[in-house]
Image: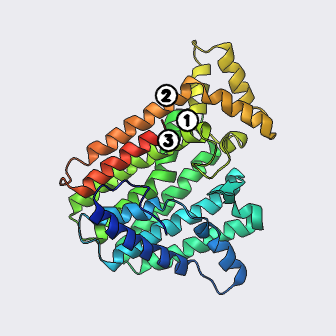
């Protein structure tokens, strides 16, 4: 059974309610990805069966506790955000050539790039079908979120323009590619639980900030873990020369007067051929010990604290406590 472990819950009654509702989301999710076509069915179920934290639907359910979290629309909203997230993973893994996802072979490793991309499209279609039942405003929110997801991936792919600040460009990529869906997860939960517009805006702002912090923490974890936390091969982004905050900070450092020969040598290795596992492991180890990783962690901590400050207007209680704890855990996991 999918658990609520991704967001710490000190209140046992709240934990029991969310566990029960998360089970309903899981059941609806599996129904939503089912297809009569055998290949579409098997490929669509691949990442659902691989598990995952279900962070986005759990955030939807948790925020809904600020209103009437028992509404069926809340469950459907949670399914929409997870289907959307899963669809992006199929596409991301093709673009990043990632061999693993959630500890299992990535879909493109099993069926090839074309099937993986089309499976992602099928999941987007199922998300669209589900959100249509929630009404025109939900459809508009989903469309805007989908647009931001695509723009984030596009801007990551083409990189910053000559006059762009690469770090600011990257933070905007994270806001669009990661934070937009986390913010929408919170927004839909509050909306369909009948919360006041001010509450909807508060939790949406929290989601935006915590989403960027979450991805920066992942940039750290990708270098400092052995892959068990992420279910992915450490350093995959480095191998594919996908920008991450530590690399951008190192590049910024090397462009300044304080760069050392060791800094420049490490950057040269990062820009070189990392197709061999041994070369990749050596570079990951070297980058892991560099100050830019601590600087990335500090940025994640700062954003997590900013996210907590956004929660100030919410009433005190177990839901607010859980959101604050989630921010704290996010910081801790990158330590």
Q: Which residue appears at 73% of the width and 31% of the height?
A: 282
Q: Which residue appears at 52% of the width and 34% of the height?
A: 167
Rendered location of residue 134, percent (x, y): 37, 78
63 sits left or right of 213 in the view: left
Q: Residue beneath label 3, please?
A: 217
In front here: 38 or 52? 52
Chain-order first, disc 1 or disc 3? 3
Q: Residue beneath label 1, please?
A: 245
* Residue sitting at the far right: 276
* Residue sitting at the far bottom: 36
The disc placed on residue 160 is none
Residue 208: tell me if it is visible. Answer: yes
Considering the numbered disc 1 on the image, is that residue within a helix, a strand or a loop? helix
Distance from the alpha carbon under mark 1 to that under mark 2: 9 Å
Q: Which residue appears at 57% of the width and 48% of the height?
A: 229
Considering the numbered disc 2 on the image, is that residue within a helix, a strand or a loop? helix
Q: Residues within 10 Å of mark 1 (few under 14, many from 20)?
A: many
Front disc: 1 or 3: 3
Considering the numbered disc 3 on the image, is that residue within a helix, a strand or a loop? helix
Residue 209: tell me if it is visible. Answer: no
Q: Are marks 1 and 2 in contact (CB under 8 Å)?
A: no
Rendered location of residue 21, percent (x, y): 38, 73
Q: Which residue appears at 55% of the width and 37% of the height?
A: 220
Q: Residue beneath label 2, please?
A: 295
């Amino acid at each position: 059974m999918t658990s609520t472990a991704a967001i710490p819950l000190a209140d046992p009654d709240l934990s029991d309610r969310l566990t029960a509702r998360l089970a309903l989301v899981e059941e609806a999710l599996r129904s939503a990805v089912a297809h009569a076509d055998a290949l579409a069915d098997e490929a669509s179920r691949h990442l659902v069966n691989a598990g995952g934290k279900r962070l986005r639907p759990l955030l939807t359910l948790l925020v809904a506790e600020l209103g009437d979290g028992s509404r069926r629309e809340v469950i459907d909203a949670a399914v929409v955000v997870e289907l959307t997230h899963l669809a992006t993973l199929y596409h991301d893994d093709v673009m990043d050539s990632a061999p693993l996802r959630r500890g299992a072979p990535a879909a493109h490793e099993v069926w090839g790039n074309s099937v993986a991309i089309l499976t992602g499209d099928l999941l987007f279609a199922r998300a669209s079908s589900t959100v249509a039942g929630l009404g025109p405003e939900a459809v508009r929110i989903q469309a805007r979120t989908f647009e931001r997801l695509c723009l984030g991936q596009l801007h990551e792919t083409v990189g910053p323009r000559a006059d762009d600040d690469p770090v600011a460009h990257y933070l905007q990529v994270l806001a669009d590619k990661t934070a937009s869906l986390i913010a929408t997860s919170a927004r839909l939960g509050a909306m369909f639980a009948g919360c006041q517009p001010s509450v909807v805006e508060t939790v949406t702002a929290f989601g935006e900030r915590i989403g960027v912090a979450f991805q920066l923490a992942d940039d750290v974890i990708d270098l400092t873990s052995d892959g068990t936390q992420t279910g992915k091969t450490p350093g995959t982004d480095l191998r594919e020369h996908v920008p991450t905050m530590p690399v951008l900070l190192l590049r910024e450092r090397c462009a300044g007067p304080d760069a050392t020969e060791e800094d420049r040598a490490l950057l040269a290795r990062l820009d070189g051929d990392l197709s061999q596992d041994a070369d990749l492991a050596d570079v990951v180890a070297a980058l892991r010990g560099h100050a830019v990783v601590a600087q990335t962690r500090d940025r994640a901590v700062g954003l997590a604290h900013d996210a907590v400050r956004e929660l100030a207007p919410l009433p005190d209680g177990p839901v607010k406590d859980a959101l604050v704890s989630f921010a704290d855990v996010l910081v801790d996991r990158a330590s």
